[in-house]
Image (cartoon, grey):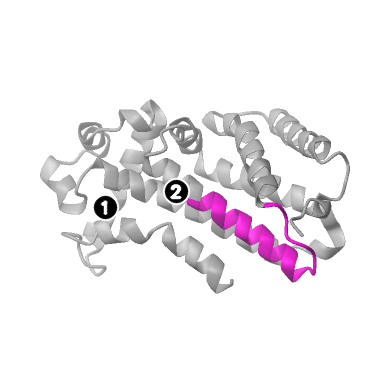
Amino acid sequence: MTQAIAREIDELDVQSANKRKRGRPTKQDSQGLALEDLIIKAAKQVCCDYGVHALTVELILQKAGISRPTFYKFFKNKEVVLEVISQRAHQELVAAMQVTMLQSDLPCKGSTSIVDIVIDTYLEWGLAQGPIVSRFYQAITDETSIIAQHRQKTGEALVNIFQEANINAGLPKFDPLLLTSLINLIEFLGNPLFAKRHSRAEFKRVRNIMRMVLEKLLMGRDITQYNIE
């Protein structure tokens, strides 16, 4: 992983880590870490059940079965918990895409390889995350939210990953707008899959539509022709 991409990933959780230092148990305090994880999981479930904007400390307390003082021992407010959830999810997507691109044979497989990588890695990540991804997607219209901020940083990191892979393959850089558009398109088509369980046939159908739309968008041409040089 290059320093540029490493910085992109690090930036996703710097603020979260700083905000959670005060009053946080030491790493040796396994019980404290277990309680912290319980709070995070409870908040994530509340978001899945009711939506990100419906998240409250009271709902977290009810879901986790803990007292209010216990919550505030670990987190300053609900926003910090939400930030941790968002940061972790988006960071995992960036890391997964980075690993996949490093393992791919990009110069030989061309545009087909890139399309498949983006689709499959995103879908695998989304299915692993579950309904929270769809809830995040509903919240991104608020540009001031931490969800929107993390999503923007994640998009920038993904574009950098694709650009670097292209450069390492000896190919010209893509137009960043093209890459961003492809990411947004896949995100739009894929999110309904994560809100609830779907059959294998439906999953395959959505994936095929993603691929068809991307290929039509590129008019059957090699994606490397859409560069900025």
The residue lying at 44 percent from left, 41 percent from top is 148
Task: Tell me which label, 1 or 2, sits earlier in the chain.
Answer: 1
**Type of amino acid at the residue the image marks with label 2:** His
- Residue for badge 1: 36
Q: What span is in magenta?
A: 153-175
CA separation, marks 1 and 2?
21 Å
Kindly state the secondary structure of the residue where label 1 is placed: helix
Location of the N terminus (image quadrant): bottom right
Circle 1 or circle 2, nearest the eye: 2
- Residue for badge 2: 150
Identify the mark at residue 3; answer none if there is no mark: none
Location of the C terminus (image quadrant): bottom right
> Callout 1 environment at 10 Å: few (<14), some (14 to 19), or many (20+)?
many
Percent x, y of residue 193: 60, 31
Q: Is residue 89 magenta?
A: no
Majority secondary structure of magenta residues: helix
**Type of amino acid at the residue the image marks with label 1:** Glu
Which is nearer the eye, 3 or 48? 3
Relative to 113, is 121 on the left or the right? left
The residue lying at 33 percent from left, 57 percent from top is 15
Which is nearer the eye, 30 or 151? 151
The residue lying at 18 percent from left, 60 percent from top is 22
- Seen in the picture, residue 3 relative to 10 is either above or below; the reply is below
- Seen in the picture, residue 165 relative to 226 is either above or below; the reply is below
Kindly state the secondary structure of the residue where label 2 is placed: helix
Relative to 201, is 154 on the left or the right? left
> Callout 2 environment at 10 Å: few (<14), some (14 to 19), or many (20+)?
many
Q: Is residue 100 visible?
A: no
Residue 170 sits in which quadrant? bottom right
